[in-house]
Image: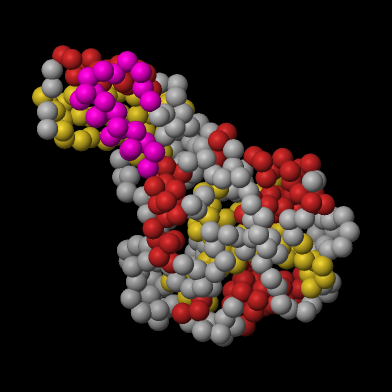
Amino acid sequence: MIPPSPLRHVARFITTYRSYSTGPITPSHSIYLSKSTNPYFNLTFEDWLFRHKPPREPLLLIYRDDPCVIIGRNQNPWKEVNLTSSRQAGIPFIRRRSGGGTVYHDLGNTNFSIHVPRTTFDRRATAQIVVRAVRALGIDANVNDRNDICVGREKMSVARLLKYTKPDEVLLYVSGSAYKIANNRAYHHGTMLISTRLDTLGDLLRSDKETMITKGVASVRSPVCNLEQFSPTVSHDKFVDAVVGEFQKEFGVDEQACVIGDSEDITNIDYIQRGMAELPSWDWAYGQTPEFEYKIERSFPWADVRADVRSRHGIITTCEVSVVNGGDAALSGAVGHLGKALQGKRYGFVEDIEGVEDERGLEIWEWLKGQMSS
């Protein structure tokens, strides 16, 4: 599934200490609040700030996105995302420009991005800014050894997504983080689950492909919860106010936050225009996928079939389909042709295969096609 073209949406902010950008946008401010909920815009604007902000000045960006799945720069979407559920729900996945694992975004989830000079970058220190903000809301949060923000007293011995007991008996993740370091600049960005749809999160991030072995980064599955489970009065705006306040105290910033949106004066900036076009493209979303191998088997009434598919950068490099038990010469010939015909094709994007006339071969193809597109 190629992610849909970016659409513009906006979210309202109600606090009063923010100044709206009225002229051409510049990377001269210390705090930016995006009122756009377009993930293609927000991720690209974040990258633009990272590349253009003077490297020695700290920066904070806060935004929310319409529902989407965000995978890490070096991840495999077929491994990380339930693509069938993604298509059915009309929720795209997007490959971000930083590393780390897969997360879910919606309007119940607030995203923060803290940029600092590379020489002073400390993952734990930036995480503590957000922890202090959460504590200011009356919630006892802490940072774990992976610099994720958690709530609770005891860590689960086996962490499984959305399977937890009482909030005060386990270590629950309310935020996940990723990082990027380039030249003289670094950033720590993350999610904060406030009132997100945990059922949708669990469905989209559930992928049962244990036999898919990838050279990319695998996500660490963890139990998650919303901040509202610990404080019913917490909200996006209160969290934003708290983070902005802690950022200002940490870095001695006294200027107002600059509120921006995906207006034409910003989206027409060449760097942002090109970035927004790149994110939903096949070359970026799928073509950046690290090398992987997928071994699958299925028993048909007339034979057992095994397939071993290898892909690199989203292109099938080899595909070996074989009859393990049963079948005959005609079937073996059909599956052999099938495997050769898939070589060089885009993984998960092949609709038809020519030259397979055996009905059993066609049935195997439909099964294989379904496996690769899910």
**Magenta region's main secondary structure?**
helix
Relative to 357, residue 298 above or below: below
Residue pictured at 48% horizontal, 82% vertical: 230
Query: What scheme was used to colour the molecule?
Result: secondary structure
Compare residues 117 and 32 and report the one nearer the observer. Answer: 32
The residue positioned 57% from the left and 55% from the top of the image is 178
**Residue 283 at x, y percent in the picture:** 57, 34
Q: Position of residue 322 (x, y in %)?
A: 23, 23
Can residue 21 be seen at all in this image of the molecule? Answer: yes
Frontmost residue, 296 versus 82:
82
Q: In the drawing, does residue 206 fall left or right of residue 45?
A: left
Q: How many marks?
A: 0
26 left or right of 11?
Answer: right
> In front: 150, or 267?
267
- On the image, the x and y values in percent for residue 123 come to 61, 61
Residue 354 falls in which quadrant of the image? top left
Q: Position of residue 268 (x, y in %)?
A: 79, 46
In the image, taking residue 313 as reference, residue 209 lies left or right, namely left
Q: Is residue 356 magenta?
A: yes
84 to 120, vertically: above or below: above
Name the foreground residue: 70 vs 142.
70
Give, as a single range, the part of the protein colored magenta.
352-374
Quadrant of the snapshot with the C terminus: top left
Q: Which residue is painted at 71% across and 58% down in the image?
A: 115
Q: Is residue 186 visible?
A: no
Q: Is residue 207 magenta?
A: no
- Which image quarter: residue 366? top left
